Image (cartoon, rainbow, N blue to C red):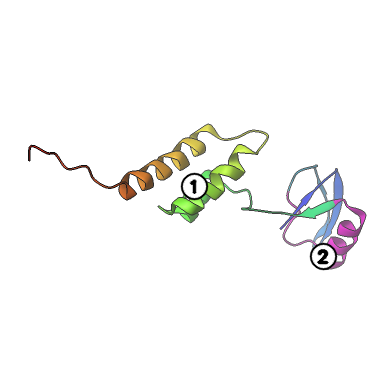
């Protein structure tokens, strides 16, 4: 996936589309357009997890604390972090931490 660094016009299979800075390049962009825009510095290849809906992220994470941390780190770097998603990812991490802590036995039991 690629993200624009500036307002960009991208040639796709169906025509030319305007893409604002920081937005994803359409998946149907022509390979030649991608190459040209990369060489100009108008787009960059995305690093880390791609932006997605909160439901898609939570589905991808499941109960995996490593994935939860990866997506949480990425979410916190967004210009508008989603508080609800952050809370749910933190809950996944907390649940994983609780399940890996050794259980404390009651000495009176």
Farthest bottom residue? Answer: 31
Disc ID at residue 30: 2
Q: In this view, does 85 lie above or below 67?
A: above
Residue assigned mark 1: 55
- Element assignment for label 2: loop
Q: Which of 45 and 73 is in front in this view?
A: 73
Q: State the residue at coordinates (63%, 52%).
A: 50
Magenta-colored stretch includes residue 38: yes
Q: Quarter holding the C terminus?
A: top left
Q: Nearer the viewer, residue 89 or 51?
A: 89
Marker count (numbered) = 2
Disc ID at residue 81: none
Magenta-colored stretch includes residue 5: no
Task: Answer with left or right where residue 102 lies relative to residue 56.
Answer: left
Task: Answer with left or right where residue 36 lies relative to residue 31.
Answer: right
Which of label 2 and label 1 is nearer to you?
A: 1
Q: Position of residue 17 (x, y in %)?
A: 82, 51
Magenta residues (range): 24-42
Q: Where is residue 61 in the image (x, y as percent from the top left)?
A: 47, 53
- Element assignment for label 1: helix
Kindly report the distance in space between the C-alpha atoms of the residues bearing marks 2 and 1: 29 Å
Q: Position of residue 29 (x, y in %)?
A: 79, 61
Farthest front residue? Answer: 107
């Amino acid at each position: 996936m690629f993200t624009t660094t500036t307002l960009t016009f991208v040639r796709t299979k169906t025509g030319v589309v305007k893409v604002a800075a920081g937005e994803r390049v359409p998946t149907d962009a022509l390979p030649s357009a991608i190459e040209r825009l990369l060489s100009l510095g108008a787009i960059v290849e995305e690093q880390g997890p791609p932006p997605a809906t909160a439901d898609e992220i939570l589905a991808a994470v499941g109960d995996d604390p490593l994935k939860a941390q990866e997506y949480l780190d990425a979410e916190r770097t967004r210009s508008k972090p989603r508080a609800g998603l952050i809370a749910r990812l933190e809950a996944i991490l907390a649940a994983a931490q609780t399940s890996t802590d050794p259980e404390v036995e009651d000495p009176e039991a």
